[in-house]
Amino acid sequence: MAEQLAFLIGGIIGGLLLLIGVSCCLWRRFCTTFTYEELPETSDPATISYFSRKEDRLYQYSGTPPGRLPSVPFVVPPSHQGRDWVPLQGGDWAVAPQDPCAVPEHMACTSSAKPGDACEMGSINPELYKSPEDTSETGFPDGCLGRLWFSVEYQQESERLLVGLIKARQLQVPSETCSTLVKLHLLPDERRFLQSKTKHKICNPQFDENFIFQVSSQSVTQRVLKFSVYHVNKQRKHQLLGQVLFPLKNETLAGDHHRIIWRDLEAKNLEPPSEFGDIQFCLSYNDYLSRLTVVVLRAKGLQLQEDRSVVSVSVKVSLMNHNKFVKCKRTSAVLGSINPVYNETFSFKVDTNELDTASLSLVVLQTTEGNKSSPLGRVVVGPYMYTRGKELEHWGEMLRKPKELVKRWHALCRPTEP
């Protein structure tokens, strides 16, 4: 009985000791969790020197501000990076106050700066204000008689054609003390015209004048604007220097703004028209693209067979090979004019090895009421197999000058039924 009592007391004492030991361990862990680490005193110079070296290296590589120990992690927020730090009492550091009205520093704009680059306040980037270079007053071809600038606008509501005469350059005048003027016709009306003021003793006159033609919207696209530039001598006689013919097409009159246009002056053809009239066109061949280009410019002296008010004139361009029809294209119709102007371009696919057997046929057609067409004249250009004279020379010059427009007049021959 005594032994059992001793074992019971020993067990109780052992359990109490174990419980006390476990409680001590838990208490130490609990105290360690809520205990702040005490920073060392900085009164010792050696300690100060040591921590200064450590924190300098940390500040250099990690962006940590001075006053923080390496053992305490510290990350500078992105919004505060690059700012100045100032010391506070007690060894702490704080961010220096920023000027709320400070102007950001930017690089000044230079001519090499790209659009959108930041620039110093008040400076101007000249690259943003550059306008396309005007090349219309350069590149005058050999034998050029001069160049004329003008503008055209048509007002639908009032049916008025507004023409602005701007300037002329490089006029080939017979004397240095030249005086020039310009006459404006709205073809096919050759009798009525408008005239500019005379510019005295200048070969590059600046006109800046405006003219108005009253013309209906139904017929304006059938008209041709003609500018005739004259030299006025001491006896006040007018000598023609050159002329510009400008067809008024739908695409030309599109829009509500002035279109500034320039054209080179052309000499007036003083030769009398042939029996059936004449036609002027350009030829060009691009051997790289195997493309034959025809530009139908104008015709003159046509012998219309009906009343002009009901007759329209067009040109049919046909490509032939071994005298067999390949393809044809047709210009727009011009109403009631014996001197129609077209300025229309057509292209045909022709291989280089077909140039010795191919030819072009241009037929001038008149169309009357009921869409009845009849030929007024015809011309064929091509190699020696089909043509002679000027037509053969035109074809040969086209081949000698690839990718260049070769312009010539040709007399129309007796028409045949299309």
Image (tube, rainbow, N blue to C red):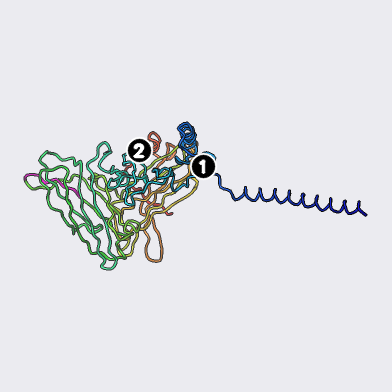
Does residue 44 appear to the left or right of 6 in the view shown? Answer: left
Q: Main secondary structure of the magenta part?
A: strand
Q: Residue at x 20, y 51 (%)?
A: 166
Question: Split into 4 quadrants, where in the image is the N terminus?
Answer: bottom right
- Furthest-left residue in view? 235
Residue 140: image quadrant is top left
Q: Which residue is mark 2?
A: 389
Q: Residues within 10 Å of mark 2 (few under 14, many from 20)?
A: few
Rendering coords of residue 345 (x, y %): 39, 49
Q: Which residue is mark 1?
A: 39
Question: Split into 4 quadrants, where in the image is the C terminus?
Answer: bottom left
Range shown magenta: 228-234
Using the rendered image of the protein, determine whether residue 130 is visible from the camera's viewpoint: no
Q: Residues within 10 Å of mark 1 (few under 14, many from 20)?
A: few
Q: Residue at x 13, y 43 (%)?
A: 202
Of marks 1 and 2, which one's residue comes earlier in the chain? 1
Q: Nearer the viewer, residue 131 or 112?
A: 112
Magenta stretch: residue 233 in it?
A: yes
- Furthest-front residue in view? 2
The residues bearing labels 1 and 2 have C-alpha atoms spaced at a distance of 112 Å
